[in-house]
Amino acid sequence: MIRKTLAGATALVVAGIFSVSTAMAESSHVANKGGAHGAAKGGPVHWGYKGAGGPANWGKLSAATAICGSGHRQSPINVSGPTEMALAPIRVSYKPTQLNLVNNGHTIQANYAPGSHMRVGKRTYRLLQFHFHAPSEHQVDGRNYDAEVHFVHKSDDGKLAVLGVLFKVGAENAFLKAIWSQMPSSKGTRSDPAVMLDPNAFLPANRDYVRYFGSLTTPPCSEGVNWFLLKTPVELSRAQLERFSGIVGPNNRPVQKVHERFVLRSK
Ligand SMILES: [Zn+2]
């Protein structure tokens, strides 16, 4: 078992190094230039969440996205029976940031000013952006939550880390309220220096998490991504969920096979 762990870790380090340039493309929207859903007439098929460009076909769209179909370390996954282990705590140090939203046709994304980070063990990851999926991308014991937010980070040596938080329908979410009131209803951007976003009050107090090595959940599906999924969900109202879904539509990639991976749960 130990040998397998070490071999896997080595492979991930290598994957991490080579996936950075493509992974960063998602963060900076370079990979999101294409149409949101389905094929552009007469042009290449762009990725989306249904039709010819849907998740089942992402691996066939181009050589750059082949790993979406062939990779064995893809995300999201169904978290079922994770191995409990003493893991380093997640230490989040997020500063409030000015509202800077993008509707890229696939999600609503808030870009983050430099200076915020997450620490796990000895590694520090800088926060780049966060964005939303509904329904959730990860499953827990075979069930989706209503939505999921991904805080995307990168370390100075190029490793990507995503902190995922699940949502279930319940009380209105104050953090989302400011974002939702300003999110562009079609592709475009929206900035407002007068509105500050502060995720600190939004994150659950309990930072217990599930950890595994996976990928970006959108093309090019680059592997070598460190996933941290908080076990404690937060709430959003039914109206908030419907408003997001009405603008972006379902934008969750189906769960991928776990294959030979360790899925760990902090205790
Ligand atoms: Zn995401």
Image (cartoon, grey):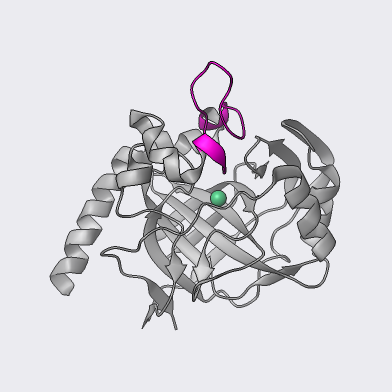
- Identity of the residue furthest to the top in this view: 42
Q: From the top left corner, tell me how far across and down residue 121 is, in percent.
A: 40, 66
Q: Quarter of the image holding residue 213?
A: bottom left
Where 210 sits versus 64, above or below?
below
Query: Left or right: where does residue 193 sit relative to residue 145?
Result: right
Q: From the top left corner, tell me how far across and down residue 187 is, in percent.
A: 72, 31
Range of residues picked out in magenta: 31-53
In magenta stretch: residue 32: yes
Quarter of the C terminus within the rendering: bottom left
Q: From the top left corner, tell me how far across and down residue 167 is, in percent.
A: 67, 66
Query: Left or right: where does residue 79 sit relative to residue 134?
Result: left
**Point 44% across, 78% down: residue:** 266
Where 156 sits versus 265, above or below?
above
Quarter of the N terminus within the rendering: bottom left
**Point 83% across, 56% down: residue:** 177
Residue in the foreground of this view, choosing between 7 and 61 = 61
Looking at the image, can residue 90 be seen?
yes
Looking at the image, can residue 48 be seen?
no
Q: What number of labels is visible?
A: 0
Q: Main secondary structure of the magenta part?
A: loop
**Point 62% across, 40% down: residue:** 106
In magenta stretch: residue 110: no
Q: From the top left corner, tell me how far across and down residue 81 is, in percent.
A: 40, 80
Query: Left or right: where does residue 120 sit relative to residue 247?
Result: left
Residue in the foreground of this view, choosing between 192 and 76 = 76
